[in-house]
Image (cartoon, rainbow, N blue to C red):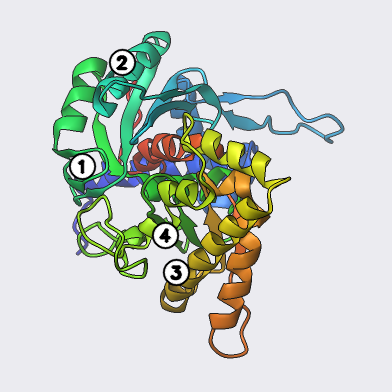
Amino acid sequence: MTEPASPASTERLRRQNASLVLRSLRRLGPGSRSELAQRTGLAKATVGTIVGELEALHAVAEEPARPGSRGRPGRPVALAGERYVALGLELNVDYVAAVVLDLAGGTVAHEVRPVGDAAPLEALVALVADTARPIEDRVLVGSVVAVPGLVRGDDRTVDWAPNVDIDGEVVAERVAAVLGRGPVHVANDADCAAYAEAHHGAATDTASLLYLTGTVGVGAGIVDGGELVRGGSGFAGEVGHMPIGDPAAVCGCGRRGCWETAVGLHAMLRAVEEPEVGTPLASAEAVALRARDDDEVRAGLARLGRDLGRGLAVLCEVLDPAVVVLGGYFVPLGDLVLDPARATLAERVLGPRQGPELRVGTLGIEAAALGAAERAFAGVFAGEVELAP
């Protein structure tokens, strides 16, 4: 005799079925109840019940019937962006960023601020306060703060972030104190940027991605099968500290010879004798402008590109990604560093296979904050978190 389903398992099944409908609407766009049943494999009656519940929450809304439809067509259902939002933040050495996303994936608000003379955490807290006011009347599903460092598997505790000198739960606690609502989590900045490029940017056409940050520090986000790869402790991707740089160069972590001493933002600026200006993107834009007419600047960037290619060769032999996306300061420099990196990578890929495709990111300096906001919605789309009324 089969045991009846427990209330907990019934509730979990209902939440998971609702997440199937929500994911379908987010990834494939609006659809009638019949189309949603085909997409999700759920019975049409079940879809109808779920849509009714989501309509009551103002999470979905019906659109006008499609023109030219025969008979009595079903009206398309679409995600609604008016009620539920998620907040993504980034804390970095010389800038902080915020992005507010709605449930439909639309950007409600976004801002990047240079840190200036303030401590990075204080600059972030001020930005959070300013960002929170315009969304006070919406339901905040959650917030995620992207940081350049190691974050434990509890998605809250910073274990090691030498470039911004923070640790423990202080970031989550300070942000939560300002917001006063919704859970606050912390994540690695490269993981968040990779997630953003996979969902919104340069890598929406692949499930196998290596994303490389380009700020003061260098980190990687790894996506396989559409999901982030975080490793046994949640620390996967700290590639900037691979010992493949100049053995004499001192890294921000206190060790010598780390890769980011050869390809990080400050290494790039030293190579071309250019001062830092505002955000990493602004500094790189100034360098790219000089490179138009300066052979020495182009030569310095070519050397950096070769160092970049050598490190990527190591990573690609281990991870075998289909696509490598370079973000942060690499984006304005484009082929000035990508061409020598591609050539070096091609020399070092083993066997007859082609190496991965190298691309620049399309989301700019806000990539990590955007990915952080998307990750704040991840529990809803996975059926782990229920939308609050």
Q: Earlier in the sequence, mark 2 or mark 4?
A: 2
Q: Earlier in the sequence, mark 1 or mark 2?
A: 1
Q: Are marks 2 and 4 in contact (CB under 8 Å)?
A: no
- Front in this rendered view, residue 191 or 43: 191
Crowding near the residue tagged with mark 1, few <14, some 14–19, many ≥20 C-alpha atoms within 10 Å: few
Residue 111: image x %, image y %?
47, 22
- Label 3: state its secondary structure: helix
Crowding near the residue tagged with mark 2, few <14, some 14–19, many ≥20 C-alpha atoms within 10 Å: few
Q: Quadrant of residue 377?
A: top left
Q: What residue is rendered at 47% in x and 64% in y?
A: 225
Q: Is residue 15 left or right of residue 305?
A: left
Residue 249: image x %, image y %?
31, 60
- Residue with the mark numbered 3: 311
Question: Identity of the amino acid at label 2?
Answer: Ala
- Front in this rendered view, residue 7 or 117: 117
- Residue with the mark numbered 4: 262
Q: What residue is rendered at 65% in x and 41% in y?
A: 290
Q: Disc 2 and disc 4: Cα gap in Å?
A: 33 Å
Residue 377 higher or lower than 311, as above or below: above
- Label 4: state its secondary structure: helix
- Residue with the mark numbered 1: 7
Question: Identity of the amino acid at label 4?
Answer: Ala
- Can you say which quadrant of the picture contains the C terminus? top left
- Can you say which quadrant of the picture contains the N terminus? bottom left
Q: Disc 4 and disc 1: Cα gap in Å?
A: 57 Å
